Image: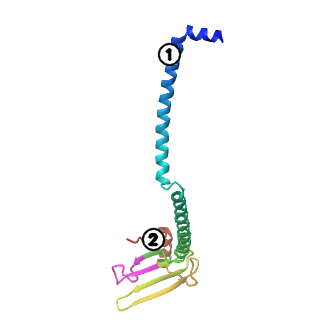
Amino acid sequence: MDVVLMILTQYNSELLLFLLVAVLVLAILVVRTTRLLSKSHARWRSLLPDGRGETIETMLYDHLKERMSIEQELDRLRARALELERRLAESKRHLGLVRYDAFEDVRGNQSFAMAVYDDQGNGAVLNSIVGRADCRVYCKPLLNGRSERDLSQEEQRAIREAKATGPKTIVSP
């Protein structure tokens, strides 16, 4: 024990300086830790003002209810999109129009052939032939892009034009 006392008395100023620096470093660490702890408590108080956790439980329950509601709406929208895609495939959205002069004495491309069909090629070809004294309209069915009846050159061109331009889409405002 005498050796320890002798060392302490010999180096007391250095030891005192070391302890003073250590106390200052520890004081700075305590202040910093207190600030961080205060910020953390403030965050938790905003989530748990009553201290029992009811607020965060309510938030989680509300979030779960909202998520379930959104998932139900998403499922409904997916089903609706599938139904619209099915309807779109069946809609008559391929259109080809060819205007022509049916007779030499009637000018102005007043006659026309129009092909209208869906994605599977089911639809019809309309042909309007305008003469000087009359106008006749013919309709020939299309199944899988073909007709059981003979088609005129203009009707065949209308089908090719409908195929070449692709499906028409209606953009609603």
Q: How many other residues sit within 10 Å of disc 2, few (<14), some (14-19) or many (≥20)?
A: few
Q: Earlier in the sequence, mark 2 or mark 1?
A: 1
Q: Name the residue under label 2.
A: 169
Vertical relation: 103 (above or below) 28: below
Residue at horizontal 47 percent and vertical 48 percent from the top: 43
**Location of the N terminus (image quadrant):** top right
Q: Position of residue 8 (x, y in %)?
A: 58, 11
Residue at horizontal 54 percent and vertical 56 percent from the top: 53
Please report contact status of discs 2 and 1: CB closer than 8 Å, yes or no.
no
In the image, 154 versus 173, the foreground residue is 173
Q: Mark 1 points at which residue?
A: 17
Residue placed farthest to the bottom in the image?
Answer: 133
**Magenta segment range?**
98-114
Vertical relation: 28 (above or below) 73: above
Q: Where, by quadrant of the figure, is residue 64 drawn?
A: bottom right
Magenta segment includes 27: no
Circle 1 SS class: helix
Residue placed farthest to the front in the image?
Answer: 2
